[in-house]
Amino acid sequence: MDERQLVETITQRVLSILQANGKSSTPEEDSIPVGVSVRHVHICQRDLEILYGPGATLHKLRDLYQPGEFAAKETVALVGPRMRSIENVRILGPMRDRTQVEVSRTDAIFLGINPPVRPSGDLAGSAGITLIGPAGALTLPEGCIVANRHVHMSTADAIRFGVKDNDLVELEVTGEKSLVFRNVQVRVKDSFRLQVHLDTDDANAAGINCGAICRIVRPSSGR
């Protein structure tokens, strides 16, 4: 067998193994849509009533991409220690057990606060911030974070991509300002729809908007 025949034989064997294992895929099968997450608030009932009055409830403005989540008609103003404010910050539903404010690093600099980069719900020792609503004001001693980069996927998607809940992966976004984002947390739940969440700073750095496409390139080293 000459060298050319040997290469062809090895190539055919490798392709057969990949196909048998179901690991061959098209670019479309590898693609993950991007959702750009702007500043927003998740709120608990007690705090909503401080800001909007006794018995206040959230009123749905529109559904969000993830099942059961929605943008509410209600908004608040965020105020930092420099007395600078960002108004009309949307509250997202459903109600949470604890109020959480998510901003970008650019927002934080403007407000004069230094929130840590955290996964949703990890609020211990995070930044304090003041919220103002039509019925009152509320100062949180902690609760403001810069949300970490993360990708939502169903159990079936996780199996397809070969990852599990809380893995860290690297995601590549192509285009004129192509970037590879590291330390992207995988969040797996049966009800999740496949989508990466980046904040506005990350999206602007890559020159992308909602609906852009990225792909997993390899597990993140964590450094």
Image: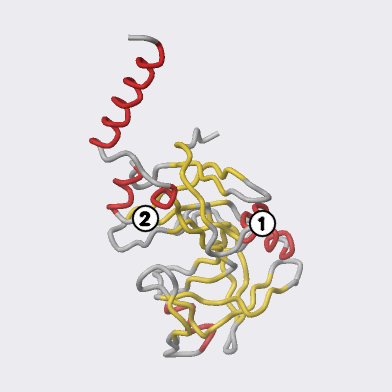
Does residue 190 appear left or right of residue 117 in this picture?
A: left
Q: Which one is earlier in the sequence, the residue at label 2 or at label 1?
A: 2
Label annotation for residue 153:
2
Instruction: State whether residue 14 is above or below residue 171.
Output: above
Comparing 149 with 118, the one in front is 149
Give the residue furthest to the top: 1
Helix, strand or loop at mark 1: loop
Instruction: State whether residue 137 is above or below residue 40.
Output: below
The residue shown at (52%, 76%) is 91
Helix, strand or loop at mark 2: strand
Picture coordinates of residue 25 (x, y %)?
36, 44
The quadrant in which residue 54 appears is: bottom left
Picture coordinates of residue 162 (x, y %)?
33, 41
The residue shown at (36%, 22%) is 8
Mark 1: few/some/many CA within 10 Å (<14, 14-19, 20+): some
Disc 2 marks a residue whose amino acid type is Met
Does residue 73 appear left or right of residue 9 in this picture?
A: right
Disc 1 marks a residue whose amino acid type is Gly
The quadrant in which residue 115 appears is: bottom right
Residue occupied by mark 1: 207
Does residue 18 appear left or right of residue 3 in this picture?
A: left
Picture coordinates of residue 116 (x, y %)?
59, 52
Picture coordinates of residue 28 (x, y %)?
42, 52
The residue shown at (48%, 39%) is 217
Instruction: State whether residue 27 is above or below residue 137.
Output: above
